[in-house]
Amino acid sequence: MKTIIIGGVAGGASTATRLRRMDEKAEIIVLERGEYISFANCGLPYHIGNVIPEREKLLVVTPEKLRNTFNIKARVRHEAISIDRNNKTAKVRDLSSGREYTENYDKLVLSPGASPIVPPLPGVDLPGVFTLRSIPDMDKIRDFIEEKRPQRAVVVGGGFIGLELAENLHQRGIEVTVIEMLDQVMAPIDYEMAAMVHQHLDFKHVRLALGDGISDIEQNETLHVSMQSGKTVNTDMVILSVGVRPETSLAESAGLKLGIRGTFEVNDHMQTADANIYAIGDAVAVKNIVSGKVVNLPLAGPASKQARIVADHIAGNEVSFRGVQGTSIVKVFDLTVASTGLNAKQLNELELPYRCAIIHASNHAGYYPAASPMAFKLLFSPQGKIYGAQVVGLEGADKRIDVIATAIRGGMTVFDLEDLELGYAPPFGSARDPINIIGFVAGNILRGDLETMEWNDVDKIDRSQFTILDVRDPEELAIGHIEGAINIPLGELRDRAKELPRSKKILVYCQVGQRGYFAVRILNQLGFQAINLNGGYKTYSHAVCPQANFDTFENVSISSREEITEKVPFNIQDSNQFEVDACGLQCPGPILKLYQKVKEIDVGDVVTVKATDFGFTSDVGAWADRTGNKLLSVDSEGGVITAKIQKGAAKKAEESKGVMTQDKTMVMFSGDLDKAIAGFIIANGAASMGHKVTMFFTFWGLNILRKDNPPKVKKTLIEKMFGFMMPRGSRKLTLSKMHMAGMGTAMIKGIMKKKNVNSLEELIQSALDNGVTIQACQMSMDLMGIQKDELIEGIETVGVATFIHASDDSNATIFI
Ligand code: FAD
């Protein structure tokens, strides 16, 4: 039996060697167009970054080795140029000599891979613009770096090869800009998980443009990359990494039909429509075992497994390829980003109902050194079938995604995850592994013990129907909070639950979701309808903050960015230095440890904190900012974050506030001119500082809002009398003191005019123009016989509940 294999890297070389193991007598010929056979294409970015310094380590196998060890004829620089199915021959061109010849076969295996997509845009063929697929591609990039010493690089595409390249170019001291067309990098994971990657890229000073593509590249003194948004970036080199296209040019001569994304269509044995022609790897479409749909998954794992199936099948074994599930993993600087199965976007497209659980858990026991957290998302059906999972973390992220990948293969449910017995000792895991914990959370959701809300639903809720409850400790609030939330720490919740309105649902959150869950259980058993924020404030805050940082770098080079943010308030030389080891602690642990230390030291002293939770890189800046301390630097190495903070003069304790918002509410009870003026001056001042202001006018305060020339309205005698006795509108108001038969009032109006202070009428108008909400109390209006038409334009008539709702969301209510 003679087998020709076209393509001699991941799929092709594996087919050849497995076939030899199965059939010692088979004649096996491998045709490879390139210069190298079976090289480690996955290692290419790391040689560019000098992480793998030895080039020869990437050359896993040579033609000589294949001949000597496996008796395989491997011909490099030999390209198959057509296939004659009827005569079972392939036409081959020797690229070194130009000679063409025909080779007959019994079985033919196509493993031609996929080539990088080069978008048809002006300038993509300029010197300094590269793609990366092969050893020669890698050599060109390395030679360019060695010779030209580029300072800046643009990587187009934020997929896994793009991000590996970004990291490795950065490793070479090059300032990197990543331009990604989607609104997130790493398409296999969901937005809120990718948000953590965006913030890590920013932390590593990688410039990131999202939702934008390149439109052309020009050669001036440097390369000038224009983007579809009109933005531009100057650079010394560009690497295009926008995806791959299956290499299926041989299909036409062979008369083989192509399927989705231009791939070879194959059956379960990896046979094309011609049973003697197999196809594998990046160039085929196969079944996704989770969705049941046919997909193209250009990854090395499936290619090598398909190779084994094909070799076995050619050797006479009835084996089948069972399909893929899309397990992938990538290192992005300090982070590990891994996923398996379907993500939320895919589930939505497939219209499959699903639920999800998000946890932040440590890779091993927190008390054992160097524990690090991971964000872990599990997607599952309402019946518990596991659809997919995503992990963004450091150590141990790979292990968890592999367990879930195995569980999916084994047809397990989320309830099985609760029971899985995984290896535990403090350096390796926890008695309740993150796998068990995410199983518990998913189980709780499906059993109805826990209702959850996703981060992107928070801003959509009707605030009049919800109270948002933050159950973190006061010290944690400086990290940030959800606008309008009330703070009752978990430990006080049982005693203070009576402060919560029973008429509303309670959206509960803590930092990572666990205390939120405890609070939900307490509240639900006290008769409230409580819902936990999935993934806690950590997931929410990562997802809602700015993701791209392209504009931040607009007028400043990336390397000088640190200098700009670092202004030291005191001379560090003279200050006492302290250290805090918060490694292994999950957020907010590092912040709380830092807070404790800062309380003990003097203004000007410096604390160096070491932590392993990457949420700390953004939290520490926000915390320092809000508490009047100074973040001097934050950096990471080997997964350990080091932040230096200098104690400053403390800002007013935000943490003592129950309600975390800037909104202001005012009750305008008095109808005195001076008090009305004071009220509107405060309202305008607060509005001009961006605070949302609501003024609630009741009893005598309603007179301020009356028109001086109202339309005729139907009234009872008493109402008419009341209306007659009370001042009609702002112009008729008098001073609370020193009215002196009108003299005092006239004097104050004159002084205001002289000193250029706006009149009350102007103040009212400016409040309305500034977006201040002016409410008239319906109940007082009824009592006093005032009708809406008698009040000035632009106000709302409301019940007291509407005002109470506004005051719930404010941090100060002023009574005038
Ligand atoms: P390839 O391995 O690409 O081999 C195809 C070969 O066929 C090529 O060498 C080509 O020259 C040759 N060929 C094509 N047409 C002809 C012809 N007519 N005649 C003769 N020869 C021909 N996957 C992962 O799972 N994890 C990773 O970390 C990862 N990292 C990667 C990093 C980089 C930079 C790249 C480029 C890919 C990476 N991949 C990774 C993807 C993985 O390498 C591919 O999925 C895998 O190599 C596909 O195997 P294949 O046999 O289908 O194609």
Image (cartoon, helix red, strand yellow):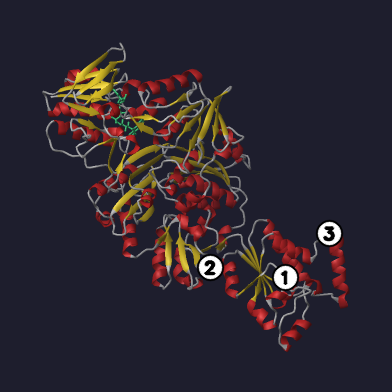
Task: Give how far across and how far down residue 299 sits, in percent.
Answer: 31, 35
Label 1, label 2: how many angstroms apart (C-alpha)? Answer: 26 Å
Front tag of 1 and 2? 1
Nearer-N-terminus badge (2/3): 2
Q: Is residue 678 above or below residue 77?
A: below
Labels 1 and 3: the sequence-earlier one: 3
- The image quadrant where one finds the C terminus is bottom right
* Along the viewing direction, whichever of 500 and 16 lies nearer the viewer: 16
Disc 1 residue type (three-letter): Ile
Residue at 37%, 46% in the rendered image = 391
**Position of the N terminus by quadrant:** top left
SS for tag 3?
loop
Query: Mark 1 sits on what residue?
Result: 792
Residue located at (85% from left, 72% from top): 745
**In the rendered image, which residue does mark 3 sit on?**
756
CB atoms at circles 2 and 3 under 8 Å apart? no
Q: In the figure, 261 relative to 404: above or below?
A: above
